[in-house]
Image: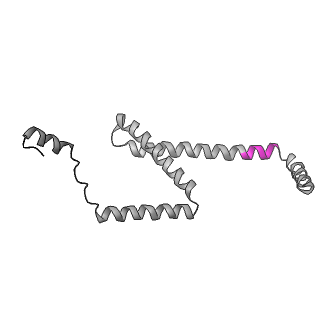
Amino acid sequence: MSTSPVLTSVEEAVAPAPAPRVQWVEIASWLLIGAALLFVLFRHLVGGLVGGLALFLILDGLAQRFQRRMGSAARPLALLAVALIAGGIAIGGIALTISFARHHADNIPAMMTKMADILEST
């Protein structure tokens, strides 16, 4: 150490600040997050978790885009838009399945017979 004020200030600037003490609330939150992750893994809910996080990201991004133009009505409007799009996709999928079943109903028994032959041969 030197008595020079320049060196003292430089040494103080270079010296790392002491790390802040971890609070018990942070430790408890880490434990809760770890328990939640273990629950998701052991209950095989990873797909639901990923889907929920993806939905959150879609809604949040859409709400931010709407908020630039509309203000406070952005979040409900984003939710309504995503719900309408998801409902339209679900209704379209159901309609496609019904249409396929109606137009190809005569092929279903033939497909079942062929599948039974394949299973029998293995």
Q: Residue at x 49, y 42 (%)?
A: 81
Q: Quadrant of residue 62?
A: top left
Q: Residue at x 29, y 60 (%)?
A: 22
Q: Which residues are magenta?
A: 97-104
Q: How is the image coloured?
A: one colour
Q: Residue at x 52, y 46 (%)?
A: 83
Q: Position of residue 34 (x, y in %)?
A: 45, 62
Q: Position of residue 61 (x, y in %)?
A: 43, 40
Q: Quadrant of the C terminus?
A: bottom right
Residue sitting at the far top:
69
Q: Residue at x 33, y 39 (%)?
A: 71
Q: How many marks?
A: 0
14 to the left or right of 35: left
85 to the left or right of 23: right
Question: Is residue 5 magenta-colored?
Answer: no
Residue sitting at the far front:
2
Q: Position of residue 114 (x, y in %)?
A: 90, 50
15 to the left or right of 43: left
- Along the viewing direction, whichever of 50 and 103 lies nearer the viewer: 50
98 to the left or right of 16: right
- Along the viewing direction, whichever of 3 and 56 lies nearer the viewer: 3
Question: Is residue 99 magenta-colored?
Answer: yes
Q: Position of residue 2 (x, y in %)?
A: 10, 43
Main structural element of the magenta stretch: helix, strand or loop? helix
